[in-house]
Amino acid sequence: MSGDVVDQIFIRAKQWLLSWLAGAPDWIIQVASSLLNIFALLGVFLTLFALISVLERKILGRMQNRYGPNRVGPFGLFQPIADGIKMLIKEDIVPARADKIVHFLAPILIAATAILALGVIPYGRNMTPFAIDGGILFFFAVGSTTELAVFMAGWGSNNKFSMLGAMRAIAQMVSYELPLIITTLPVVMVVGALSPDAIVAAQSSYSFGFVPHWFVTTPWGAAAFVLFFVSGLVESNRTPFDVPEGESEIVAGHMTEYSGFKYATFFMAEYIGMFAISGLTVTLFLGGWHAPIHVLQFIPSYIWFFAKLSALLFVYIWLRGTLPRTRIDHIMNFAWKFMLPMAFTCILAAAVWHYMGRGLAGWLCSLAVIGIVYIALSILLDTRKRFATRTYRFAE
Amino acid sequence: MIGTGILKGMAVTARNFVGSYFEKDRLITVQYPEERTPLAENYRNFPFLIYDTDDAEAGLRCVACKICEKECPPQCIYIIKSEDKKPDYMGKPQFYPAVFDIDISVCMSCQICVEVCPFEAIKMDKVFELSRRERFDALLQRKRELSKSNTYYHSICPTEAAEVDAKLAEAAAKKKPTPPPAAGSAPAAEPTPAPVI
């Protein structure tokens, strides 16, 4: 099948490259295979980072009715090269009172964890760089290391703005880690596996040939998808949850004392973290690399994955163009009073859906559970003040 | 309901995003070096010297009276009056500025020199792309760079130039009962349209 050839072209290419090592000891082939995966991942995602950094500025510009960057190269597409050169030739300043080792290690650690998390996501049919059974667990374990790196940056800089920014980052990231993981639970429970490949495989069939069995098509899945997406926004420190680096208040948060290439590394880690969390969203709720309609399966699987990823990234940018920065106490209230109860409701709704036979009745009951809790929370959490009509009394 | 306000806001940004590709009047940014907005007729920045006819030396209206030099608040004008008198374009002997420099990095574009000049010899220019790599050579403008023809003045400020020409013609008529045509105004009498600079 010719479609299969295109679909598996990268796998074939890798096998062909490894065939040069035929006869070498097993461990050499193992190492070479891993290295190939790593280089492919880095190549793809660093290119995507460069591309998204210019596209983000262009899209934000369009949302504000102006052209984005359009001077460097065709349509301004070489802007990341100019930015990169600018970053590289800047002076690398380390504060005299900084904890030099911690200050130096923080950007490395944050970039390493962000890139590690990319490894377990299935990018296409047979295209999981590092297929581990506990892939989801690995993802969150590595993802929570980001907090350590952020705090290292804040502490190592020995600067009050860095420290405050790091504290804020830790506070919000820890708070949202909870809904993030709890909204993953229903998917893991329904599939019965922690492996991303198994989760993608569980979403592979279609009803009537055009309704994909993605988890986002179930009520609990849709709710969990939104909650997961919002938690992902917080985890990647994106607007409207970018208080850790609120320029108007604390300069640049934990990145205040970083300049030049170290700052660029933080910036890159932030975007790669965003790709990782979006990739996991696609895997968990949007059917991974499966086509949305049965007929469209001839399009290679990795194209579908990256199309879904790009759509999510567009929503990230769209939200950034829409919402202002939230206040830290509002973020916290939102996490504990809304996100967490809703996340637990998702588990309940998934259980209802599962034990009612995964049919239409289960679908409707699950929707009812989510709907009731959502409306109840909306009423309970509505703190807008309602003023009585003002009456004026004048001296006579 | 929680979240409805966010959806409304996202609809607004989406409308702007899509609209910016289809409605040209949404993108109001002027892409400067390629496109320019026409300058207002009363726009001014740095002074220049006017000469009549085509001869920049003989036609210079300036007689080095040094009033502008004295009045200039930031003291950016430097004039050395000539020792001798040279005939101007009408044959009348006049003093002339041997040196006339304006340091446009000091000039504050106040137009006081224009207002005090009794000979309508100094006017405000509209050239604004004057950035240079060196301060002392390029921004200290000499008499040769400052001298510009009356035709040029008509091309940048037609209304004002016509008024100035009329005033000069009137003064010349008062002085001499049999007037020769005033100050080279014949070719420049009808105002040329405002340039798109």
Image (tube, coloured by chain):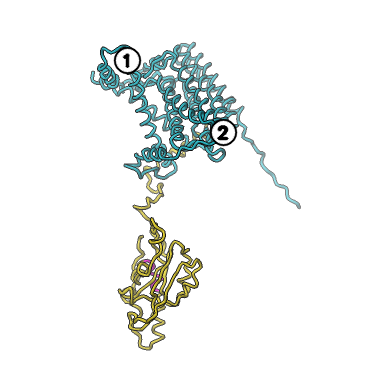
Chain colours: A cyan, B yellow
Magenta span of residues: B156-162
Where residue A30 sits in the image (x, y, percent)?
A: 34, 15
Rate crowding at label 1 as few (under 14), some (14 to 19) or many (20 or more) other CA atoms within 10 Å: few
- The image shows residue A302, relative to residue B25, as above or below, that is above
Q: Earlier in the sequence, mark 1 or mark 2?
A: 1
Residue holding disc 2: A158
- The amino acid at mark 1 is Ile
- The image shows residue B127, relative to residue A4, as above or below, that is below
Where residue A11 sits in the image (x, y, percent)?
A: 29, 19
In the image, is A327 to the left or to the right of A219? right
Q: Tell me, yes or no, whether the two marked residues, 1 and 2, touch with CB atoms within 8 Å.
A: no
Rate crowding at label 2 as few (under 14), some (14 to 19) or many (20 or more) other CA atoms within 10 Å: some
Residue found 39% across the figure and 83% down from its top? B172
Q: Nearer the viewer, residue B169 or A244?
A: A244
In the image, is A4 to the left or to the right of B2? left
Residue lying farthest to the left in this orientation = A2
Q: Nearer the viewer, residue B18 or A96?
A: A96
- The amino acid at mark 2 is Asn
Q: Main secondary structure of the magenta part?
A: helix
Q: Quadrant of residue A41?
A: top left
**Magenta region includes residue B14:** no
Residue holding disc 1: A28
In the image, is A21 to the left or to the right of B24? left
Q: Is disc 1 placed on a helix, strand or loop?
A: helix
Residue found 48% across the figure and 15% down from its top? A353
Q: Nearer the viewer, residue A252 or A224?
A: A252
Where residue B102 sits in the image (x, y, percent)?
A: 42, 67
Q: Which mark is residue B177?
A: none
Q: Quadrant of residue A161?
A: top right
